[in-house]
Image (tube, rainbow, N blue to C red):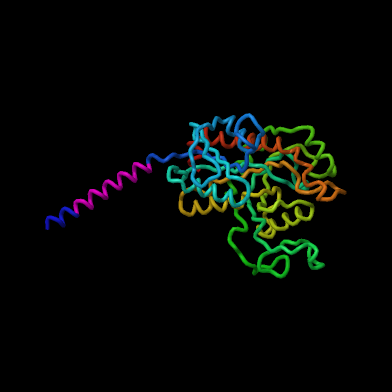
Amino acid sequence: MFDYITYKRFVIIFTILSLIHFNTASAQRTSFKVIIITMMEMGDLTDDGIGEAQLWYQRDSLVNEMEIPGAYSPLYYNDNGEGLIITGGGLANATASVMALGLNPKLDLSNTYFIVAGIAGTSPQVCTLGSAVWSEWILDADLCHVIDAKELPDNWDFSRFRLGCKEVWCENGWTIGTEVTQLNSSLVKKAYEITKNVELFDIQEAQEIRNRFPANSAARREPFVTIGDNVAGNTFFYGKVYSEWADWWVKKWTNGQGTYYVTNMEDSGIVTALKRLSETNLISFDRVMALRTASDFDQQYPGENASDCINDTWVGFPIAVENAYRVGGFVAHEIVNNWAEWNEE
């Protein structure tokens, strides 16, 4: 009897101590108001070539570091509740880094806002170099069949088509489940409304590139803030035909609700990771935003070949990086400075 009573007391004491330890550990987890997700950086975060992360790091004093095992970079942060991570380029790096961030036991990200902020290619039919695009729909460009263009049926416009179909599209094709992701439309509209008048950076060299497109095209405009949709995949596609395919792909998967504006190599993986984390209540998917700024056009100049122009329009890189910070930073600072209001939504 004595041994049994002693055992029961031991179990009770052990349980109480475990709960105390768990609650203490939970209370000590670090929380953030907003985390900026960038994809690439050129060298160091100071005093060298600027990538997507450097302006955030320097201007917002994100000089503290927390190691995130499994992620491409540490989590950089300041004392105001703002953080920054660099995922690495491509879907695999981006997905792995965001999952590592969300699963880190030292963090409580249940109320955190996330802003994906990086560069992109854009269609000259709808946008121009330096523009900032908030996206509601994120499409995966890689979940498809591909036939070599030399072997296409005569009546096909594109070499990429839906999985499980014998035509370019069929309603009973295979579904993986991550072909299309919709972000919180109310938050997208709010982000656009509060940033639509942000002054954007521009340079003469970018205007010279714009001037090679027709006078009535969006390409000829000065940079602007807008809402448009996002196609992401590991393949860096380029050319007028692929641009037309991307717009068709967006319209098919969104039932005509979306319009293709920007292309990149990470966002479908990032939002997939964030959605999985949200399904286990580690983050709120309603607090995810995707911002891409146009660094280059996704197709050749009129009258030129795609292969001759694919690397010609990168003069837009510095204005895209700057405007990602100006527009994304406006929202990030609004969240930090008005946390009580934002945390109620």
Q: Residue 296, image x and y in percent?
A: 74, 43
Q: Residue 50, image x and y in percent?
A: 66, 34
User: Does 152 sit above or below residue 313?
Assistant: below
The answer to whether 165 appears left or right of 271 in the picture is right
User: Does 336 sit above or below residue 164?
Assistant: above
The answer to whether 191 appears left or right of 342 in the picture is right
- Is 13 magenta? The answer is yes
Residue at 56% from the left image edge and 31% from the top image edge: 60
**Extreme right residue here?**
303
Residues shaded magenta: 8-26
Quadrant of residue 131 within the rendered picture: top right
| Quadrant placement of the N terminus | bottom left
Residue in the foreground of this view, choosing between 302 and 92: 92
User: Does 319 sit above or below residue 276?
Assistant: above
Quadrant of residue 162 within the rendered picture: bottom right
The answer to whether 167 appears left or right of 17 in the picture is right
Residue at 12% from the left image edge and 55% from the top image edge: 2
- Our reading of the magenta stretch's main secondary structure is helix
- Is 287 magenta? The answer is no
Residue at 81% from the left image edge and 50% from the top image edge: 307
Q: Residue 209, image x and y in percent?
A: 81, 39
Residue at 73% from the left image edge and 52% from the top image edge: 237
User: Does 54 sit above or below residue 299?
Assistant: above
Q: Residue 227, image x and y in percent?
A: 67, 45
